[in-house]
Structure formats: structure tokens, C-alpha cells
Image (cartoon, helix red, strand yellow):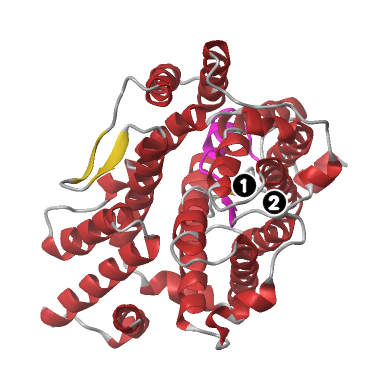
Amino acid sequence: MLERIFKLKAHGTALRTEVLAGLTTFLTMAYIVLVNPTILADAGMPVAAAAAATCLAAAFGSIMMGLVANYPIALAPGMGLNAYFTYTVVQGMGLPWQTALGCVFLSGLAFMLLTVAGIRQMIVQAIPRDLFAAIAGGIGLFIAFIGLRSAGIVVSNPATTVALGDLTTPAAGLTVFGLVITGVLLAWRIRAAMLVGILATTILAWVLGVVDWKPAPYSFEALTATAFKLDVPAAIGIGGEGLTLALIEILFVFLFVDLFDNVGTLVAVTKRAGLVDKDGDIPRLNRVLVTDSTATMVGAVAGTTTTVSYIESAAGVAAGGRTGLTAVVVGLLFLLAMFFAPFAQAIPAAATAPALILVGAMMMAPLVESDWTDPMVAIPGFLTLAAIPLTFSIANGLAFGIIAYAVLRLARGQARWADWLLYVLAALFVVRFVWLAAG
């Protein structure tokens, strides 16, 4: 049965190899079960329920990826988009988390429709490739900044905007400890470095008595406190005036980041696994994108943010994973992890902060792909890279980068009719800034 579904022999792999590859991928990305609820808690969501929803979305997406697309790619709620959900949509715009989950669901539905209609290819081609790296780097800085702030290492300052915090506080000290432990493990290429670092820091926090957590009985109701709580009608009617610019902006950011995050991950992982065809194209690409959009909608119903393909899947590929059986194993392990979701509340923020900081650091890697000596590339790229963390908004970074790219092309006389969608996007972002100023 496994041979018939996954074609193991045709891909030069075996059951044992695929299982070990799935375990490797799971250990590499299991930190999301602890980190994602920490971020969503700042949006007012119950931690145990958010952890359970994270496991469920990751399990569903990974298993569907394996069975439908037959790729060794695991899915889970994406880093960066969870921060946008909490700090921009909920805290910045003042939306209830239920309404924000409705926006996540709508973005998954929109992604599905765009994939089926073939419009996604137009959007991918319209965005300059040089901005891909800057977007990834900007989101990395955004995530790292959140980690530094939650640890108290970076604090607000009326004179300088930000400043160094008190490193003698328990939170800062624990975070530094976690950074050292996790950093050393990463340097030694330990697969479960993130997870081990989080657990080691948590144990130290408990030993020092700085964790205030009272265990509660295992409760199914506690794990489902976010399930089916999304409010799609409220999402459609943000502002009380129907489909508003605010909803369009939120959907665009969710859709845009999800789209390119998946494209980047697919290219990296499939190339590493030797799964691209002779023309360099990715077979069954639509199946992958339909899986992603379906997992996002299921995740929103369960109570978590946008589900994306994880670059950590490359760890499983390096361990020999070549088929969807690897992803199915990852999904089954996430289902098992769901039963430990209540214990996510026992993990202090100081334990997850190092993971945020180091995930942000590793997201800097794509920046080497850009030609920073070319002003036509460097200016839009830098504006994107800097604006995302400094304005605390992925949307602002996208806007600055796309507008700058369009303006420079027009000024150089390099505008082409083939790039019409790029200029439409730039114009929409200009309208967005005008609308924000008027509001």
C-alpha cells in the first residue's frame, strides 16, 4: 500500500528512511508548538487551545501534503504571519482575535480560488525577485525584534526610541542562557536544537522559581477554546462598511507572504531532494498550493494563523526523505504532540524568546541572493528590509519596497506593459498610505 501511494522505490527510498526523515523534520520544527501559542497569547488567545490548534493545523497540512502532493514537505503555522496577526491586526488595528481568524480563513479561501484560476502565476511574476530576499530578511528582523523585546533585552526609550534593557533581570538572563545553549547546538548541527534550547531554558526557569504556573486538569474544553470561534462575517464587514481597505490590506499581506513563503520553500526543498523536472519546474505545484490553502482554512477553524510550508523540511530531505511519507510521519507526530498542549502554558516567554531571535537570524540567509551594489535593487530591498521591523508591519515593508521599485523603473524609463500588475500594486499601496493619513 505504501509503495502504491508514495512510490518509494521510484524515488530511491525505503520505509525506514522515510520514517527517520519524518522524525528529523519534526524535531527540527517542533519548537512552533511552544512559540506560536506564546505569540498568539498576546492577541488574547488561550495558550493551551492555541497550542492544540497549532498541532492540529500542522498535522492536517503535513498529512494532506504527503497524501495529495507526495512531497516530503511539512506544514505548520508560519512565523512572521503569526506576529503580523497579533501585533498588527489585533493589537495595532484593534480587531478581536475571532475577527482576525476570519481574515485568515478568507485569505486561505482567496488563495485557493487564485490557485484554481491560475492568477497566482501572474502575482508571482509581477513581484520583482530581488524583493523576495528582502521580504524574508525583514520578517526575520521583525521576529527577532519581538523576541528581544519579550525578553526585556530591548526596551522602549523616550529619547532614543529603543535601548538596551536590564540584563540582570531573570527574563533577560534566561534568554541569554537560551541563546547560548541553542546557538551552540545549532553550530553543532543538532536537529532538535530549538526544542532542546526551549526545554533547557524552561527547566532552569523552574529551578530558579521564576515560573508562575498552576497545573490544571486535562480538559477537552480548554483545548477547544479557540475552535470554531472565527468570525468570518465580522471580517468581511470590518469597519461596518462591508469590504473595506483594511480587510483588503490584511488579506493581501496574508496571501502575499504565504504565497512567496511557499514558493521559496518549495524551490529550496525540491531542488535539494532532486524532485524538480528537467525544465526546472516543480511537478504537482497546484496540488501543493491547494494543500496549503486548505490547511490554512482548517487551521483558522481550529484557532491558529496561516499554515505554510516549512523550510525545516530540508532537514528531513537531508536525512533521506524523498516522498510524502516523510510529511505523513511529521503529521502523525504533531497529532501525538497535541495531547501535551496544556503544558505549553508552563513554558515562560524567556524560553521561547531565544527561538524567535535565532529563527530571525537564520532568515537572513536569502539576503546574499540580492545584488546590493545595484541601486535599482538595493534601494527597494533596503526599504523593505528596514520598514518591516521599524514600523512593526509587514504590510508597510511590502508597500515601501514595491512603490520604490515601481518609481525607480519609471524614472529610468524601464517600465514595460508586461509589468502592469506591479504598477497597479504600487498604486494601491499609495492609495493605502493616503487612506491611512486621512484616517
Name the spot of residue 176 as percent of width and height, x first. 37, 21
Q: Badge 2: few (under 14), some or many (20 or more) residues near its Cα, within 10 Å?
A: many
Residue 144 in picture, x, y percent from top left: 37, 40
* 76 horizontally vs 153: left or right: right
**Residue 319 falls inside the magenta stretch:** yes
- The answer to whether one can see residue 113 in this image is no
Q: Are marks 2 and 1 in contact (CB under 8 Å)?
A: yes
In the rendering, which numbered label is found on residue 61?
Answer: 2
The x, y position of residue 184, in whole percent, is 40, 17
Q: Which mark is residue 233?
A: none
**Which residue occupies the foreground of this view, 358 or 268?**
358
- At which x and y percent is residue 433? 30, 78
Occupied quadrant, residue 283: bottom right
* Image position of 263 with respect to 427: above or below: above
Q: Residue furthest top?
A: 207
CA–CA distance between discs 2 and 1?
7 Å
- Range shown magenta: 306-322
Quarter of the image with the C terminus is bottom left
- In the image, what residue type sits under mark 1? Ala
Sequence-wise, the earlier of marks 2 and 1 is 2
User: Is residue 252 shown left or right of residue 364?
Assistant: right
- Asked which secondary structure carries label 1, the reply is strand
Residue 382 magenta: no
Q: Residue furthest right?
A: 1
User: Callout 2: helix, strand or loop?
Assistant: helix
Q: Amino acid at mark 2?
A: Gly
Residue 397 visible, this orientation = yes
Residue 222 lies left or right of residue 213; in this view the side is right
Q: Which residue is mark 1?
A: 76
